[in-house]
Amino acid sequence: MKIQKHSGELVEFDVRKLQNSLNKSGADESVISHIIQQIQNQIYDGMSTKKIYKAAFALLKKTSNSHAARYNLRQAMEQLGPAGFFFEKYIARLFSAEGYQTQTNLTLEGKCVTHEIDVVMKQSGQLSMIECKFHGQRESVTDVKVPMYILSRFNDVKNQEHLLFDSLTQIHHCWIVTNNRFSSDALRFGHCSGLNLLSWDYPENQNLRDKIDANHLYPVTCLTTLTLNEKNQLMGQNVILAQELIQKPTVLDDIHLSANRIKNILKEAHELCRQKL
């Protein structure tokens, strides 16, 4: 049975890939087995992976909003746009959870020109700049031109002194983070140039998906009990993580939601972040 990927390529349907993605939702084995059986009964030659995802998501949502929310993570990351401004804030929070001090949306003077830097982070006296490459479409890939360009920017700012975290210091390292994938050439060039690369599936065991799951840093865009407009309103109020809703639930009053809806949203957020009510 052939299915159509986001890129348009036709590939053999692999039930193990579907099972792996459902396993990451946290659903029970019996639920996963039932969903796989339902999908196999519905699938047809040429069916798109997008339709398969939607069918699996709908079936998951019938059993648990939080499992559906976790399954929805890849698409939720694509909603941190449209320009990626919220993605930059999200990445700063991701590294903050790992013990880094972070600052976002900076303008730094290089040796030759001025640069807008997405994120700067500090840990153990070492400073790094982070450039975030956001993609709103699943098939988009960060190609080799991106690390080549960012390396030139890093070289222009790294030997200059900058006032960061209340002291004059230099930037020692450079990261490139994307919510999608790097091309093979981009990975080779990044390694050769000493750049740190982080994507949805790279590096193995320490990629973006792994970091999110390890620290339960799910964006509010995951939540199935919120509309897209409500998610954007919350992010506009600097609420990027589901955890932040738990910590400050009054922001849901600020966007004029009913008491019953607030209860359901917070229930999903607690379950998603695996925190007890």
Image (cartoon, helix red, strand yellow):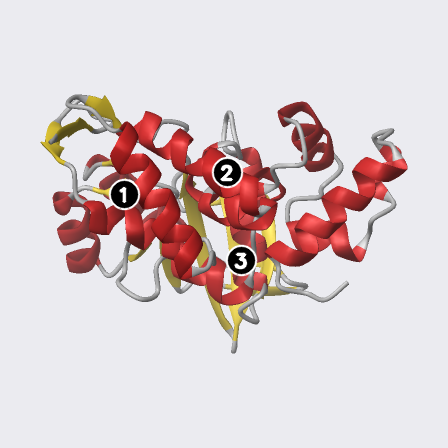
- The numbered mark, 3 or 1, whose residue comes first in the sequence reads 3
Front one among 26 and 158: 26
User: Where residue 242 appears, x then y in whole percent?
Assistant: 66, 50
> Quadrant of residue 49 in the image?
top left
**Total numbered badges shown on the rendered structure:** 3
**Crowding at mark 1 (Cα within 10 Å: few <14, some 14-19, many 20+):** many
- Tell me the SS state at disc 1: strand
Q: Is residue 158 above or below residue 84?
A: below
Identify residue for label 3: 94
Identify residue for label 2: 76
Q: Amino acid at mark 1?
A: Arg
Quarter occupied by the N terminus: top left
Q: Residue furthest bottom?
A: 124
Marks 2/1: CA distance?
16 Å
User: Where residue 246 appears, x then y in whole percent?
Assistant: 76, 55
Instruction: Identify the residue shown where x is 21% and y is 35%.
Output: 145
Q: Amino acid at mark 3?
A: Leu
Instruction: Identify the residue shown where x is 50% and y is 59%.
Output: 161
**Residue 181, labelled with which disc?**
1
Circles 3, 2 touching at the beta carbon (< 8 Å): no
- Tell me the SS state at disc 2: helix
Q: Amino acid at mark 2?
A: Ala
Q: Is residue 145 above or below residue 26?
A: above
- The numbered mark, 3 or 2, whose residue comes first in the sequence reads 2
